[in-house]
Image (spheres, coloured by chain):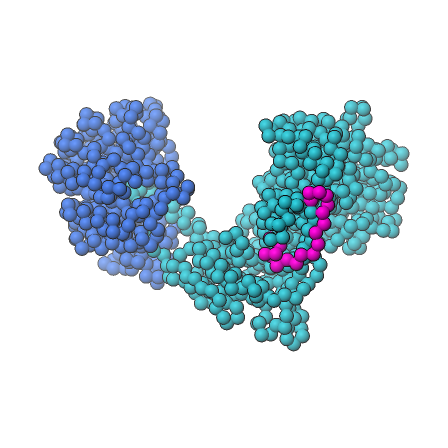
Chain colours: A cyan, B blue
């Protein structure tokens, strides 16, 4: 292809993503666009084509990104190449969202005609605006009885300040308005700018590991071109590779001779480690490098740590293999071996956030069939000992004895919470409860407020986001960034079962809340741990001091004393089911502890 | 086969806890169903299953006594056509107190039925209403008297404990009343709330105030003690009898022996295979049109499974599992197969060995499921 052909093609490229609240119909709309452009025939259509992991399909959320090329012949008779870039929809993955938006010139803002704008949408709209994207409002589910498109339009104009007069009325489910959406993409989303003759600048917005080809890097070409045989360099890591294949997803892999400005596709280059291809990094040509990388690269550091232990200790090696495989696909996942007296051999793993943690845990259980015990998530504490040494502690059980500690510092974040002003009170109450320090509050317009708090990271890692959503009816949007460490009055709380300390149940707590928490946790454990062969005391202790106690009773009666007639198979099934339940418990000393107990320390606020 | 179970899936009233295969009597093809029982027996005989040497027949349900005298008579006639009733060691029927009229008692008696198992469940008026029973607390006394007059002396009653809001005191009163009849046999079952029952529904709505595990354990304990005092030996976890009055049919199940299951939804164990018949009446009756048995599913019991069953069924009996009979049945000693498990369980004080048999200890009886599970792979 020569320069003019490239420029002609570039003129007809449109890159966009879809922004929507979790069940406002993003995936359905994506499916319809694929269908309408005959990218995927109806026959091949599974519902939610873009969400490829089972887990995504089940949870209805997008975890890993996808980009699909579509061809569309517009009403003006010209043929256009669209790239639809999917984005994950959770605060844990804000950075990935921002990078995938950076690969686009436009975004479809899908709003439910009955429910209006929700918090998650807002956060992503602001990310899109940050990236200077052209935003096309779409009012979806127009055929619902409760649809009120005019009200939603007004809301879009009031809350986001977008002109919604040309918002498409659509129903992705019924196929209404799809053509109009495609036409608006042609008309309103700008064509990519950038010079195909300039040195290569390709933005990495995702990567995944393929067992034959190595890492497949999803890229958006911003400047220049790339083709097989080119020598490339990752500008952040400095690693160099030779390109083996270039191509696009349609949504299946289709090879292309080259990728040029505006193209969204992939390359493979025998890269063995996903960590070499970091999201947000810029790929350039090693022989003709760009002088500056694209803006916005940020190394992703795990924020949340927990121990993963196989319930069946003999699965330790399987667990390592599972983590190795997952790591290939997930550069944000970190792990190292650790040992717990209670749980045996396992791994301390680092995650971007709790959703990320849950996803990894669930994938290990499902895809690798290893039943896990997950210990309560922790952040990294800075512990300064009395002899002046500084320790990093990411596992509460590793906390030194209280008398050897001079002080403990914990990570704080600056949290920005955007919320309609009716909910300011409940947001502040929640933040206060979470040991937050109020900073400022700005009115964005007549009805919306941006509240800034400094909060200990440890207080938000678990279910802050969920609590925030429920106390604001889903209207709050939330973002946070790490601002550093602050000294806090923290103590380690130990839990004793049957008089023995269970290291995996230790947690760090602010001294002022310690008695309350101790009391609540022993009650909670009493209810979570099934009755045992004998009476088991449950104690919470700070150092040598017991601060709370409860007792798990011994089993009263557990025998089938029902009239079952001759249905022996049924008896067998019942016994098998009970036995299966037992297998999912971990023997800690002489006490059988179910998985949930290890997470119990975090779920306190639900009671 | 040593025993035969015949299922009569009709009830005039459905109890709130019952999850057996049953339907309301009204508008059902009852007569046709009774004839189908005959068909099934005939097909079975054709397939080469012999009823010679049969020791027991057990009519269960549903409610066998929901049938009219004429229907009962016809059912017994059919059974007589296939089974030499005179040679049986035991011929039992389940019965609802308020349906057991003198007329029906006479029909049963002349049809060769020798044992009655009456579903009394409780002697507390309020509780009976609560669980959906139609008889009153007074009915059983009258029925037992009538049955004795007609010549039934092998009578058992079923009782249930752990009922919603049942107190230990109420249970004690029920036991007192039950024992006052000086029956040779009693069954005491604990309430298990099963899916597809009224109780299950209530429980999910949080409206079933069950007494809880500790109270239930206390009731179970009281049941065992009271029966022992009265000389009724606990020959199986839920069954108590004067020596010589144990239910032979029930023991066939716990002895892991073979029995035929006849009727809709009945379960059987024949020639090394456990099977279940079709449950829905129409399906059950129509499936025999082709001359085949109405079997919905059948499973070959592997040697391993048979050994497991030998244990988890056998340990329910007070006499336990005999080392000798295990070995002669399976060609391996109990220790060879379950040595580790046996050691662990006896270490926990849940089982013990005496008179050449492995038995549950009293502690083990309370935690039977824990013991039974250990024998499953």
Percent x, y for residue A243?
Answer: 79, 46
Q: Quadrant of residue A107?
A: top right
Q: Is residue B297 left or right of residue A41?
A: left
Was residue A432 drawn as part of the magenta stretch in this picture?
yes
Residue B63 visible, this angle: yes
A304 vs B158, left or right, is right
Q: Residue at x 47, y 52 (%)?
A: A584
Residue A364 position (above or below residue A396):
above
Residue A172, position as x, y percentages in the image: 65, 30
Q: Is residue A350 above or below residue A544?
A: above
Q: Residue at x 43, y 53 (%)?
A: A582
In this rendering, the count of numbered labels is 0
- Could you tell whether A450 is left or right of A550 in the image? right
Q: Residue at x 72, y 36 (%)?
A: A157
Q: Which span is picked out in magenta?
A: A430-448
Q: Is residue A458 magenta?
A: no
| Camera sees residue A29 | no
Residue at the extreme bottom: A387
At which x and y percent is residue A378? 60, 59
The residue located at (47%, 64%) in the rendering is: A548
Question: Between B217 and A470, which is closer to the camera in this rendering?
Answer: A470
Position in image of residue B297 (x %, y %):
38, 35
């Amino acid at each position: 292809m020569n320069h003019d052909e490239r420029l002609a093609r570039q003129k007809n490229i449109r890159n966009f993503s879809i922004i929507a609240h979790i069940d406002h119909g993003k995936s359905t709309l994506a499916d319809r666009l694929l269908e309408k452009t005959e990218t995927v025939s109806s026959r091949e259509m599974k519902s939610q084509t873009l969400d490829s992991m089972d887990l995504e399909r089940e949870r209805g959320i997008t975890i890993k990104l996808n980009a699909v090329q579509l061809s569309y012949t517009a009403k003006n008779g010209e043929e256009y190449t669209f790239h639809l870039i999917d984005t994950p929809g959770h605060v844990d993955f804000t950075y990935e969202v921002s990078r995938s938006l950076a690969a686009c010139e436009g975004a479809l803002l899908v709003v439910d005609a009955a429910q209006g704008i929700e918090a998650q949408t807002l956060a992503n709209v602001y990310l899109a605006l940050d990236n200077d994207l052209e935003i096309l409002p779409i009012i979806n589910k127009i055929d619902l009885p409760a649809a009120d498109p005019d009200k939603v339009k007004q809301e879009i104009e009031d809350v986001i300040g977008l002109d919604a007069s040309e918002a498409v009325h659509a129903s992705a489910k019924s196929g209404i308005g799809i053509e109009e959406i495609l036409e608006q993409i042609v008309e309103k989303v700008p064509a990519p700018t950038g010079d195909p003759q300039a040195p290569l600048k390709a933005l990495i917005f995702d990567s995944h590991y393929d067992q034959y080809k190595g890492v497949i890097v999803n890229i958006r070409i911003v400047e220049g071109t790339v083709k097989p045989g080119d020598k490339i360099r990752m500008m952040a890591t400095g690693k160099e590779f030779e390109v083996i294949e270039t191509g696009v997803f349609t949504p299946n892999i289709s090879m292309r001779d080259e990728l040029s400005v505006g193209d969204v596709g992939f390359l493979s280059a025998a890269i063995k480690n996903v960590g070499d291809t970091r999201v947000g990094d810029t790929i350039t040509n090693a022989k003709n490098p760009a002088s500056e990388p694209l803006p916005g690269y940020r190394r992703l550091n795990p924020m949340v740590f927990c121990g993963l232990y196989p319930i069946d200790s003999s699965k330790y090696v399987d667990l390592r293999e599972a983590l190795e495989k997952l790591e290939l696909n997930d550069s944000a996942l970190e792990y190292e071996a650790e040992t717990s007296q209670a749980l045996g051999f396992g791994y301390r793993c680092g995650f971007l956030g709790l959703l990320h943690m849950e996803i990894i845990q669930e994938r290990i259980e499902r895809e690798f069939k290893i039943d896990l015990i997950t210990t309560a998530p922790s952040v990294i504490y800075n512990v300064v000992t009395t002899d002046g040494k500084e320790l990093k502690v990411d596992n509460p059980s590793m906390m030194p004895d209280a008398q050897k500690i001079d002080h403990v510092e914990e990570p704080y974040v600056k949290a920005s919470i955007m919320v309609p002003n009716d909910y300011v009170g409940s947001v502040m109450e929640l933040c206060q409860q979470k040991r937050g320090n109020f900073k400022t509050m700005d009115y964005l317009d007549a009805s919306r407020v941006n509240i800034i708090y400094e909060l200990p990271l440890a207080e938000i890692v678990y279910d802050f986001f969920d609590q925030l959503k429920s106390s604001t009816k889903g209207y709050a949007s939330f973002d946070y960034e790490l601002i550093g460490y602050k000294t806090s009055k923290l103590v380690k709380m130990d839990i004793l079962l049957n008089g023995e300390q269970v290291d995996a149940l230790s947690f760090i707590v602010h001294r002022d809340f310690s008695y309350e928490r101790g009391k609540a946790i022993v009650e909670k454990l009493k209810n979570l741990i099934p009755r045992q062969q004998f009476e088991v005391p449950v104690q919470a202790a700070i150092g040598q001091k017991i601060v709370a106690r409860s007792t798990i009773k011994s089993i009263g009666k557990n025998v089938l004393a029902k009239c079952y007639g001759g249905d022996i198979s049924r008896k067998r099934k019942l016994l098998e089911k009970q036995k299966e339940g037992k297998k999912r418990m971990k023997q800690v000393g002489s006490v059988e502890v179910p998985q949930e107990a290890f997470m119990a320390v975090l779920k306190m606020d639900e009671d | 086969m040593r025993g035969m179970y015949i299922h009569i899936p009709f009830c005039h009233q459905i109890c709130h806890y019952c999850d057996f295969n049953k339907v309301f009597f009204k508008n059902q093809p009852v007569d046709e169903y009774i004839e189908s029982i005959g068909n099934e027996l005939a097909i079975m005989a054709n397939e080469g299953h012999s009823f010679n040497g049969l020791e027991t027949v057990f009519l269960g349900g549903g409610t066998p006594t929901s049938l009219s005298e004429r229907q009962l008579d016809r059912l017994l006639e059919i059974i007589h056509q296939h089974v030499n009733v005179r040679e049986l060691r035991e011929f039992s029927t389940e019965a609802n107190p308020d349906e057991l009229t003198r007329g029906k008692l006479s029909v049963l008696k002349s049809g060769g039925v020798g044992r009655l198992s009456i579903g009394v469940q409780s002697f507390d008026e309020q509780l009976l209403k609560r669980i959906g029973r139609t008889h009153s607390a007074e009915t059983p006394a009258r029925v037992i008297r009538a049955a004795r007059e007609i010549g039934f002396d092998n009578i058992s009653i079923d009782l249930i404990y752990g009922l919603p809001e049942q107190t230990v005191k109420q249970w004690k009163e029920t036991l007192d009343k039950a024992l006052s009849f000086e029956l040779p046999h009693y069954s005491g079952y604990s309430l298990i709330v099963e899916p597809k029952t009224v109780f299950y529904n209530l429980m999910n709505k949080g409206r079933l105030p069950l007494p809880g595990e500790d109270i239930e354990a206390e009731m179970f304990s009281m049941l065992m003690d009271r029966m022992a005092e009265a000389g009724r030996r606990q020959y199986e976890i839920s069954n108590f009898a004067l020596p010589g009055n144990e239910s032979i049919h029930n023991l066939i199940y716990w002895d892991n022996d073979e029995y035929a299951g006849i009727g809709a939804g009945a379960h059987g164990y024949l020639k090394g295979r456990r099977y279940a018949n079709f449950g829905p009446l129409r399906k059950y009756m129509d499936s025999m049109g082709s001359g085949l048995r109405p079997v919905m599913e059948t499973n070959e019991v592997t040697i391993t499974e048979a050994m497991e069953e030998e244990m988890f069924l056998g340990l329910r009996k007070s006499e336990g599992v005999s080392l000798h009979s295990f070995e002669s049945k399976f060609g391996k000693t109990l220790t060879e197969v379950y040595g580790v498990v046996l050691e662990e369980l006896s270490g926990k004080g849940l089982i013990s060995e005496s008179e050449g048999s492995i038995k549950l200890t009293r502690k083990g009886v309370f935690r039977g499921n824990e013991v039974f599970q250990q024998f499953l792979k």
